[in-house]
Amino acid sequence: MIRRLCFGIVFLLFFTSLAHAEMVSIKTPKARIRSGPGVNHPIKFELGTGYPLRVVSRKGKWLKVTDYESDTGWISKTLVSKIPHLIVKTEKAVIRTGPGTNQRVVGNAKRGVVLRTLKHQKGWVQIKHESGLVGWIQRDTLWGW
């Protein structure tokens, strides 16, 4: 009984922390993710506008972040914003005219495509693609906020 209670508390704390994780997105056309907090650290990779990241920790003006593939690194706070974005985490996400599988398909987005978050509704997200296309995608095919 105590073991089940402890597991339940740990489970609840883990998922509560995920739900309240701080998210940011890249606000510049090109942002460098570094191996440590500072410009003297090597560049690990670069990301473009809107790319969503989860903040893991902070050090001065730097954020340690992770992405949807669990890659981690450090980025300057000046390169991120609180504008919500999502990234397609499955091979393909279907874009529909409304929130439901009975809605007309208006497009598809491949894995790694970044989308601007407009609205959430019961397992669906209204998104805007950089092309201007607006539609709805099932939430479980996306990562971010």
Image (tube, grey):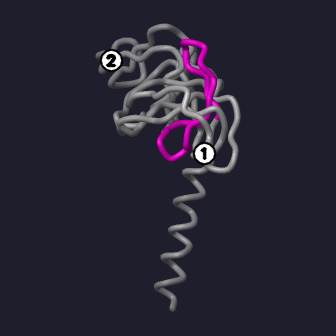
Residue 128 circle label? none
* Picture coordinates of residue 32, whole percent (x, y): 40, 14
User: From the viewer's perspective, is the residue at label 2 or at label 1 nearer?
Assistant: 1
* Picture coordinates of residue 36, whole percent (x, y): 36, 25
Quick one: SS at disc 1? loop
Residue at horizontal 62 percent and vertical 45 percent from the top: 100
Q: Residues within 10 Å of mark 2 (few under 14, many from 20)?
A: few
Three-letter residue code for mark 2: His
Q: Is residue 8 above or below residue 25?
A: below
Q: Is residue 126 above or below residue 13?
A: above
Task: Using residue 8 as the reference point, say whether residue 36 is left or right of it.
Answer: left
Give the image quarter of residue 68.
top left
Residue at horizontal 44 percent and vertical 24 percent from the top: 113
Look at mark 1 in the image and give the residue it sits on: 102
* Picture coordinates of residue 102, whole percent (x, y): 60, 45
Look at mark 2 in the image and give the residue it sits on: 41
Residues shaded magenta:
126-145
Does residue 137 show up magenta in the picture?
yes
Q: Residues within 10 Å of mark 1 (few under 14, many from 20)?
A: few
Report the quarter where the C terminus lies. Answer: top right
Task: Using residue 89 as the reference point, say whether residue 137 is left or right of it.
Answer: right
Residue at horizontal 49 percent and vertical 7 percent from the top: 29
